[in-house]
Amino acid sequence: MTGGLPYQPWAAELAKKRAAENGLNDPHSQCLPSNPLRLYTLPHMTKIVQTPGLLLIMNEYNASYRQIFMDGRPLPVDPQPSWNGYSSAHWEGDELVVATTGLRDDLWLDVAGNPMTSEAKLTERIRRPNYGTLEVDFTVDDAKAYTRPWTVKFKMARVLDTEMIDEVCLENEKSSRHLKDLQNAPAK
């Protein structure tokens, strides 16, 4: 985004602090779930399965999934906050419009540590301009963290002749004990 994100002052400070920590407290590096926006930025395979009333997005990272309801149901009024929130979608011509609310208050949008709060309303506009490509315009409307809504665009290529594999973050994990030692090390 030209000129950077339109942070609220506290969010700018938090993003700066998180960046200075070099991802030490990044939920992803601690094997915690991601969120709808961040899943588009990870280098893991994603599979999308569509039924008449449900779009299921599966991701290799920790065998995670996201449900997008396409049966006309409204978003919950007072949802229990979750990593992926609650999503409902409808078609506008050849574009799938996904609305998401009900996210947690402590999410990282990306590896840089940009924050997202429980006030966030996400809108994805997904289209398929040709057989091998998905284009996604992803709008974040989070007045608690940003002074105005902003949009990022993703272009995703279809991967042929492959299957998803399990990628379980903590399987045979031996690094976290060293990260804790680094946290307590004196500054140089």
Image (cartoon, rainbow, N blue to C red):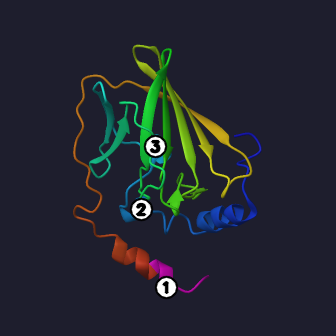
In the image, the segment drawn in magenta is 182-188
In three-dimensional space, the C-alpha distance between marks 3 and 2, rounded to whole angstroms, equals 30 Å
Could you say whether the residue bearing mark 3 is in a helix, strand or loop?
Answer: loop
In the picture, the quarter occupied by the N terminus is: top right
Observer-nearest of 150 and 162: 150
**What residue do we see at 44% from left, 59% from top?**
81
Q: Earlier in the sequence, mark 1 or mark 2?
A: 2
Crowding at dot 2, Cα within 10 Å, few <14 / some 14-19 / many 20+, comes out as some
Q: Which residue is mark 1?
A: 184
Q: Which residue is mark 2?
A: 29
Q: Nearer the viewer, mark 3 or mark 1?
A: 3
Q: Position of residue 180 (x, y in %)?
A: 42, 79
Observer-nearest of 187 and 111: 111
Q: Residue 147, relative to residue 104: is it above or below?
A: above
Q: Earlier in the sequence, mark 3 or mark 2?
A: 2
Q: Residue 50, relative to residue 13: is it above or below?
A: above
Amino acid under disc 2: Ser
Q: Position of residue 42 (x, y in %)?
A: 43, 44
Q: Is residue 161 visible?
A: yes
Q: Which mark is residue 78?
A: none
Residue 24 falls inside the magenta stretch: no
Q: Is residue 154 left or right of residue 11?
A: left
In three-dimensional space, the C-alpha distance between marks 1 and 2, rounded to whole angstroms, equals 18 Å
**What residue do we see at 61% from left, 63% from top?**
19
Q: Which residue is mark 3?
A: 75
In three-dimensional space, the C-alpha distance between marks 3 and 1, rounded to whole angstroms, equals 44 Å
